[in-house]
Amino acid sequence: MTNLTSAAAPAPEQLADHPRMVRGLLNIAHALDHLFLLIFAAAVSTMAADMGLAQWQDLMPYGAGAFFMFGLGALPAGRLGDVWGRRSMMLIFFFGIGAASILTAFMQTPWQLAISLTLIGLFASIYHPVGIPMLLERSANPGATIGFNGLAGNLGVAVAALLTGFLIQWQGWRAAFIIPGVVALLCGWFFARACPQEVSSPAKRKGGAKVNLPAPLLARALVVMTAAAITSSVLFNFTTNGNGLLLAERFQGVMEDPVALGLLLALVYAVASVAQVVVGHLINRFSLKRFFMFMVMAQIPMLVLASQAQGWWLFAALIGVMVFIFGAIPFTDFMIARYVDDRLRSRVSGMRLGVSFAVSSLSVWALGPVVKAMGFGSSLLLLACFSVTTTLILTLLPGAEHEQSPAS
């Protein structure tokens, strides 16, 4: 791999993108990352009954460790990605998450389950600070790359709802962890064969790492971005872990087959995932700050509508909610690509993810108790308040006059 010569004049290695197989596997990895984190949420009712618990709400807090480590683990993962190498870290991701998922299938008690789910979260934490910067390091169009990668990740969310329901009916909840685990191991094998060895890690490439903002503005942008990511991650975690249970509650008397409900939820996520591709193509055409604020503000009326809707009206409202929640996701990754040099991206991404996902993991822990105490209607209104908070935070982002082309 040819070293970088300067931030302003990209070296030849940046002109040729990764091989198609490598890009494909990096996008599949994003799908797997979200799929593994949501198998538990899709299967929690069946698992609770199997473990002798009366309600799914009683088992849900045991999954919080996965999301806590998903955030906390991003800190060392980002640093290792820059300093040690992104290829090596992605191999650990594929083989580690596959093995942890298969291990989960053999757990017998809630506390055993909590340990294995935490391991899944630890390995899942590698992808975002490592896999996305790896995709972007040679990309000529970061917006489109992030948009398509976001589509892949959220299709993983959709597949989790559909595949888990099918596997539970076919072979039980344990198969829902084993089969995706085997797929991850196979993807790791293909990635090892297809991805060339790195001659040097990103941090050791020639030229000083540079950013496109003055230090005070960069610090403000990163603080605002992290604060906004915390509130946005609360919405993402609460909805993606709770939507299946919300549909089951609001569709009583209309549709109650788990596979059919899983198909409906997969359709919600599939439609909403397209929003990330659209955002990726539009993100260079509008002010980043105003576009981001629009996507967040649009969540508010959708959440209010979903809090009151039943049956098919809820289905329509959920599509609106998830379109704008998913559509807001690419902005933070694009901001890192715009403002931060590639030699620092994994570490900056890891710091942002470490804080935001570790804090927002509390929403997964609180999902069961909050819904049990307040019901889904009041819970969705509470989420609307988080969208209001995110909008206010985004007013502090640097304005259009500071927006430049992506960092080299």
Image: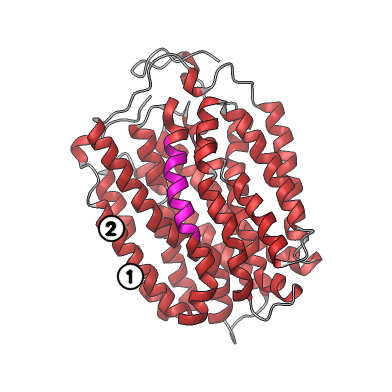
Work out which quarter of the rendered image holds the N terminus and state it: top right
- Residue 176 sits in which quadrant? bottom right
CA distance separating discs 2 and 1: 13 Å
Work out which quarter of the rendered image holds the C terminus and state it: top left
The image's mark for residue 301 is 1
Left or right of 319, for residue 34? right
The 10 Å Cα crowd at callout 2, few under 14, some 14 to 19, many 20 or more, is many
Q: Disc 2 or disc 1, which is closer to the eye?
A: 2
Residue located 46% across and 71% down the image: 316
Magenta span: 348-361
Instruction: Give the colouring mode of the picture.
Output: secondary structure
Nearer the observer, 262 or 285? 262
What secondary structure is the magenta-colored segment mainly? Answer: helix
Label 2 belongs to which residue?
391
Residue 385 in picture, x, y percent from top left: 33, 68
Q: Residue furthest front?
A: 111
Of the residues shown, which amino acid type is indicated by label 1? Pro
Mark 2 or mark 1, earlier in chain:
1
